[in-house]
Image: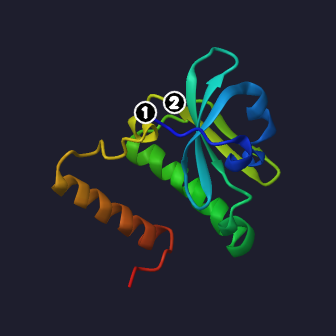
Amino acid sequence: MHQKLSLEKARLESLPTILTKDYKDIEVIQQSNYHYSLNARSQKDQNEFTIKILDVQSEFYQKKDADKAKTLFLNEMLYYQKRFDTIIQGGIYTDGRKIAYVAKRDHLFFNGSNLHCSSQLDGLLKTVLEDSLFLIDQMGFPPLS
């Protein structure tokens, strides 16, 4: 069960304008320090989708490094698409500094079951190691000390 956050708290001003016209019943399902995951229903066909938006109001974006936040957001999108066969069905949208993409809602990763890769500890640890190496080697994150 997802806790529905208010539109103000969700900072939906980060959502590209066209998406507010094309989707309804928008609800926040996940929040990080630089993006939101939303469930929404298409006005066109009534199907449910997941929308990921870059939070341009976040402290990471505003006070640390906006370019790094945008780069991380886009790299994460491409990584999810490759790693989990996420289908970017609704497209990628930009509106000034706002960035969002729309994915099929029925994809397990976006439904909160991001451990679907493996139900066993060995598989989970392998996934964590691979993801950590990707962040360090490909995206330039410093190793944890």
Residue 66 place in picture, x, y as percent: 71, 67
Q: Quadrant of the C terminus?
A: bottom left
Residue 48 place in picture, x, y as percent: 56, 24
Residues at discs 1 and 2 in contact (Cβ within 8 Å) = yes
Count of all numbered marks drawn on residues in the image: 2
Q: Quadrant of the N terminus?
A: top left
Amino acid marked by disc 1: His
Q: Residue furthest bottom?
A: 145
Q: Nearer the viewer, residue 7 or 125?
A: 7
Q: Is residue 70 above or below residue 133?
A: above
Tell whether 145 sits left or right of 75.
left
Q: Which mark is residue 104?
A: 2
Amino acid marked by disc 2: Lys
Q: Is residue 47 above or below residue 76?
A: above
Per the image, label 2 sits on a secondary structure element best described as strand
Q: Nearer the viewer, residue 82 or 109?
A: 109
> Within 10 Å of the Cα at label 1, are there few (<14), some (14-19), or many (20+) other Cα atoms?
some
Q: CA distance from mark 1 to mark 2?
A: 6 Å
Q: Which mark is residue 16?
A: none
Q: Is residue 95 above or below residue 39?
A: below
The image quarter containing residue 12 is: top right
The image quarter containing residue 144 is: bottom left
Tell whether 117 sits left or right of 17.
left
Q: Residue at x 56, y 29 (%)?
A: 49
Q: Residue at x 83, y 51 (%)?
A: 96
Residue 3 place in picture, x, y as percent: 53, 40
Q: Nearer the viewer, residue 121 or 1?
A: 1
Q: Say which residue label 1 marks.
A: 107
Per the image, label 1 sits on a secondary structure element best described as loop
> Within 10 Å of the Cα at label 2, are there few (<14), some (14-19), or many (20+) other Cα atoms?
some
Q: Residue at x 46, y 39 (%)?
A: 110
